[in-house]
Image: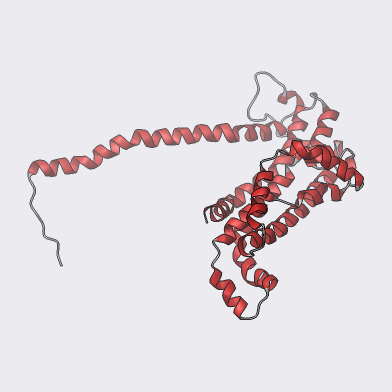
């Protein structure tokens, strides 16, 4: 049915035509202000990283000149090769990859099982135990690292891979994240699998886990970044070069170079930061989606 057309006064037509451009004129200062604020925030957050990378490609003399130059006059790509020559960064990278991957895998598996148990399995003291876990999440690591060091010393795990990996496997944040996700998981799918004869473990492996890829992916990336940058724990556990990670290797490299080779220090720092930045930039959407799915259900 056609909509009837009603006549309007000439003054009303003029007002209506002018309303659109007037609204746009009132909105453009806010749009410009938002863009300026985003540009300033981007410079503040990414400026130090860009400066670090550009400094790592300068000569030693140019990296300490005043006033400083932004773009290198000569691109010194050999600085990165010299870093591996002056320090065993290959061993440092191997240790970081090994400990980060194994710790992350352990955190994902244990957190998924524990989160599923807290969300779906009813057992005595479930709520009290979960509240205690959340309370432990508020305790700073600096409070418990002394007894932890004594415990690892009793097991002879100081300066070892197991000392770097095993204590990092439990993750209270991971348990909380998976529990929140599983609370919103459709129970009908589990009931259908139960009717088909699937046990508890089989239901989790065949039904729950394949449908939890979003939260698993998000927590995997967050866990990997945390384990890669876990400097304080690595610093109190390891004091030999054989088991040092990239973060600890930077301290050794800095003590060797001092302030005389600023460009090489920036090159070493770039080698430590770039893998984490690349992982975050590639999977940032998955991180946000997993946190939203886990936290809002």
At 67% across and 30% down in the image, what residue appears? Answer: 72
Image quarter in which the N terminus is found: bottom left
Q: In this view, does 82 lie above or below 111?
A: above
Horizontal side, residue 204 vs residue 40: left or right: right
* Residue 194 or residue 93, whichever sits in front: 194
Q: In this view, does 268 lie above or below 99?
A: above
Q: Can residue 218 be seen in this view?
A: no
At 82% across and 25% down in the image, what residue appears? Answer: 258
Q: In the rendered picture of this protein, how many numbered marks are placed on residues?
A: 0
* Residue 276 or residue 197, whichever sits in front: 197
Q: Which residue lies furthest to the front in this view?
A: 124
Can you give x and y, in whole percent of width and height, for residue 24 in the image?
29, 39
Horizontal side, residue 192 vs residue 52: left or right: left
What is the quadrant of residue 211 in the picture?
Answer: bottom right
Horizontal side, residue 288 vs residue 231: left or right: left
* Residue 126 or residue 204, whichever sits in front: 126
Can you give x and y, in whole percent of width and height, for residue 51 in the image?
65, 31
Can you give x and y, in whole percent of width and height, for residue 266 in the image?
73, 33
Q: In this view, does 65 lie above or below 239?
A: above
At 72% across and 22% down in the image, what residue appears? Answer: 64
Coloration mode = secondary structure
Horizontal side, residue 54 vs residue 39: left or right: right
At 74% across and 40% down in the image, what residue appears? Answer: 272
Q: Residue furthest bottom?
A: 196
Q: Is residue 23 visible?
A: yes
Q: In this view, does 209 lie above or below 271?
A: below
* Residue 69 or residue 120, whichever sits in front: 120
Can you give x and y, in whole percent of width and height, for residue 269 in the image?
74, 36
């Amino acid at each position: 049915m056609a909509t009837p057309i009603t006549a309007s006064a000439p003054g009303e037509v003029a007002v209506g035509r002018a309303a659109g451009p007037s609204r746009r004129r009132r909105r453009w200062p806010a749009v410009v202000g938002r863009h300026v604020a985003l540009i300033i925030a981007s410079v503040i957050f990414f400026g130090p990283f860009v400066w670090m990378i550009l400094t790592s490609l300068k000569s030693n003399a140019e990296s300490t000149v005043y006033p400083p130059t932004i773009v290198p006059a000569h691109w010194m790509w050999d600085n990165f090769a010299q870093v591996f020559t002056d320090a065993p960064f290959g061993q440092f990278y191997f240790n970081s990859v090994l400990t980060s991957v194994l710790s992350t895998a352990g955190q994902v598996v244990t957190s998924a099982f524990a989160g599923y148990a807290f969300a779906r399995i009813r057992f005595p003291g479930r709520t009290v135990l979960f509240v205690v876990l959340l309370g432990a999440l508020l305790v700073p690591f600096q409070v418990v690292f002394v007894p932890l060091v004594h415990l690892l010393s009793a097991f002879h795990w100081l300066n070892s891979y197991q000392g770097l990996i095993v204590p990092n496997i439990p993750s209270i944040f991971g348990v909380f994240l998976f529990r929140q996700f599983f609370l919103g998981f459709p129970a009908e799918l589990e009931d259908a699998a139960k009717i088909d004869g699937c046990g508890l473990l089989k239901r989790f492996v065949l039904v729950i886990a394949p449908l939890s890829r979003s939260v698993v992916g998000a927590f995997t990336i967050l866990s990997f970044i945390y384990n890669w940058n876990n400097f304080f724990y690595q610093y109190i556990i390891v004091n030999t070069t054989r088991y040092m990670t990239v973060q600890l290797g930077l301290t050794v490299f800095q003590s060797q170079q001092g302030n005389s080779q600023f460009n090489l220090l920036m090159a070493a720092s770039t080698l430590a930061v770039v893998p984490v930045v690349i992982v975050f930039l590639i999977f940032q959407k998955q991180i946000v989606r997993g946190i939203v799915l886990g936290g809002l259900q």
